[in-house]
Structure formats: C-alpha cells, structure tokens
Image (cartoon, grey):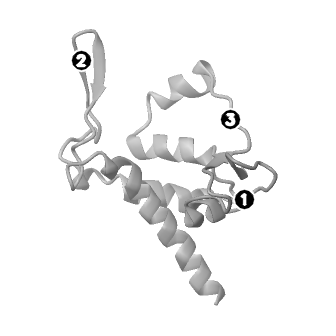
Amino acid sequence: MKYKSTRNGDSEYSFEQALFSGYAPDGGLFVPTSLPSITTDEHLIPWSKLTFSELAYSVLRMFISPMEIDDVDLKEICTKSYLADDFDDETLVPVKKLGSAFVAELFHGPTFCFKDIGMRPVIHLLSHFATLRKKKN
C-alpha cells in the first residue's frame, strides 16, 4: 500500500514515510493511493466475530504492506495497543443503544478519552519503526 498527498498525487510514499511525516511535503494530507474493497461476506461478517485487537489487525493489514511490517509484528502491535487490562470494559468499546441509534463509548481507556482507541496503535507503530531505524544505524 502506498500513500499520496491530497494536494499533489504525483509522488508516492510508504506507510512509514507517511506516519513519520504527518503531513505531505506539499502540506496536504496523506491518503492511500487506492482503497481496498470491503464486502459483507468476505469482511464484515467475519470481522463481527473478532476481538478488538484482531479486528484492528485485519483493518490495518489492508493499509500497511507486509513488506513494511510483517504479520507477526503487526499482530503484536495490535495486541499491545488493546490490552483488556488497560480498559475498564471487557469489550474495550461497548456499543449502547440510544433510541434508534447505536453509540460507541470511546472513553473506557486509560485516559478516559477517545484518543485511547486511535493513538495507542500509532504510538506502537512509531516505536516499531524507530526500533528498526536504530538497528540499521
């Protein structure tokens, strides 16, 4: 999976380059060069039976090339990101019915803030790549 800028899609970047850069060199946001196809039978139904960390792995695998992070390391990153002991609800993100709507409660993490869901894997991904860079030097 490669990434490009929302302002100028001529250049392609790896996941690692996009992650460490934050913004593209031209000030745009990084987006995938193509989006994976997700189907009910192949993805949504099987995903409904996964743990949160397994689901995170399955989704991230679609956006991170195995050439950049192998399956073992990505699974470990996802597992470390969503340890049940770090959340005060066993489902990590309970979904509650509110009238005719369903609401995901994103405040059950260690800081009681929605960022616990999105930023925990980012921290572990940054650490993974930083460790690889340190080994190269």
Foreground disc of the pair 1, 3:
1
Q: Which amino acid type is shown beneath numbered disc 3?
A: Pro
Q: Quadrant of residue 130?
A: bottom right
**Which disc, if any, is residue 97?**
2
- 53 in relation to 131, above or below: above
Tag 2 or tag 3, which sits nearer the N-term? 3
63 w.r.t. 18: above or below: above
* Residue 47 in view in this figure: yes
Q: Which residue is mark 3?
A: 36
**CA distance separating discs 1 and 3:** 17 Å
| Three-letter amino acid code of the residue under disc 2 | Lys
Q: Residue 55 in the image: x percent, y percent? A: 47, 40
| Disc 1 residue type (three-letter) | Tyr
- Give the SS element for disc 2: strand
**Mark 2 Cα shell of 10 Å, populated few (<14), some (14-19), many (≥20):** few
In the picture provided, is 56 more to the left or to the right than 27? left
Q: Earlier in the sequence, mark 1 or mark 3?
A: 1
Q: Secondary structure at mark 1?
A: loop
In this view, the mark in front (1 or 2) = 1
Residue 109 placed where, x, y %? 24, 50
Cα distance between the residues tagged 3 and 2: 30 Å
**Contact between labelled residues 3 and 1, with CB atoms less than 8 Å apart:** no
Q: Which residue is mark 1?
A: 13
Report how far apart the C-alphas of labels 1 and 2 lie in the structure: 41 Å
Q: Decide if residue 55 is on the left or right side of residue 21.
A: left
Q: Nearer the viewer, residue 65 or 30?
A: 30
